[in-house]
Amino acid sequence: MIAGPHIKFGVVVFPGSNCDHDAYYATKKVLGQDAVFLWHKDTHLQGVDVVILPGGFSYGDYLRCGAIARFSPIMKEVIRFAEQGGTVLGICNGFQILVEAGLLPGVLLRNTSLRFVCKYVHLRVENTGTRFTGLCTPGQVLAIPVAHGDGNYFTDPETLAGLERRGQVVFRYVEPDGTVSEAANPNGSMANIAGIINERGNVLGMMPHPERASDPVLGHTDGQLLFTSIIEWTRARTRQGREEKEIWAISAQPK
Amino acid sequence: MYRVKIRVTLRPSILDPQGKAVEHAIASLGSGTVRDVRMGKYIELSIDERTESDARRVAEEVCRKLLANPVMEDFVFDLEKT
């Protein structure tokens, strides 16, 4: 539970989502914020500050992971929201949906092991200048679980170089001491990529599950940092917006 | 009406671990001559258009927008009047 004004999270529910309640629980019960479920057939985002596309197997992973969810009615609104600068967090299947929707570059291929991988991994925070990681320290190593069969991030070399150059690789799979190694990479992702952000900095996709590492009862709370960073950023922006409005109102008053 | 038979394949630059696993299984059958297994998808559908060029245009669009992901996949299709 964190003090201060509440912000509102919207968790999209697709047929086959199975981490929607975890995301709702982490934001509403653990962090004490407002949270609502957004049904995939809805066409209204209910005024949320942040959209979460949760993990799971939307539409049974038919065709390709995330390929069908991308055409859900709610996704039109999510895409519009993202284009207007709204905060969108895609976790696991949510990340797959974001790349299928073209909100993030690249694609998530089958794990090179061909196995479903479900375990705690270590992530190094590569960019703390984002609204999702503002409360992390540079190079901080977080313990957060993964659970996926298709998390092998791939893109063409030019796109990868661009992502690296612009600091869009936000999380990388590493050893507990923070060194990048092949052994620390659970799925064969290029450059050990675990999470990326769009150029504008408002859409983040990641394979690991921060919502599963948020409740102290479960032993790990590193995942909370993502949500608390988003909350802090959103509050600061709301404050700033209010102040700007006030300044504008004062200066606009007739003398 | 046109019947369309679509093949979606991984682009040559993409590693295909599934194909590799099948290749190893084939090798364990005792055949040492099988190489370069690549897995893909096969899709059939009908398109209710009058002309072949219209049917082709629709098939193209469906493949490009949904059935194949151009980042990792290529597609080809055959089209037959029914």
Image (cartoon, rainbow, N blue to C red):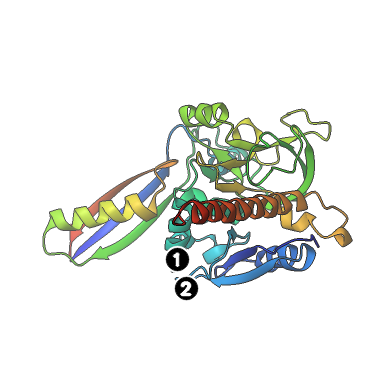
Seen at 65% across and 66% down, the residue is A20
Q: Residues within 10 Å of mark 2 (few under 14, many from 20)?
A: few
Residue B2 falls in which quadrant of the image? bottom left
Name the residue nearer the viewer: A35 or A90. A35
Residue A215: x %, y % from top left: 82, 60
Look at the picture and state if A232 lies above or below B2. Answer: above
Q: Please give the residue where the numbered disc 1 appears in the rendered image.
A: A72
| Secondary structure type for disc 1 | loop
Q: Is residue A89 among what the camera can see? A: no
Horizontally, is A165 left or right of A144 in the view?
A: left
Q: Residues within 10 Å of mark 1 (few under 14, many from 20)?
A: some
Chain letter of disc 2? Answer: A
Q: Please give the residue where the numbered disc 2 appears in the rendered image.
A: A41
Q: Amino acid at mark 1?
A: Ser
Name the residue nearer the viewer: A147 or A62. A147
Cβ atoms at labels 1 and 2 below 8 Å apart: yes
Seen at 66% across and 55% down, the residue is A235
Q: Earlier in the sequence, mark 1 or mark 2?
A: 2
Distance of mark 1 from mark 2, alpha carbons? Answer: 7 Å
Seen at 60% across and 65% down, the residue is A11
Residue A175: x %, y % from top left: 79, 33
Horizontally, is A77 left or right of B77 in the view?
A: right
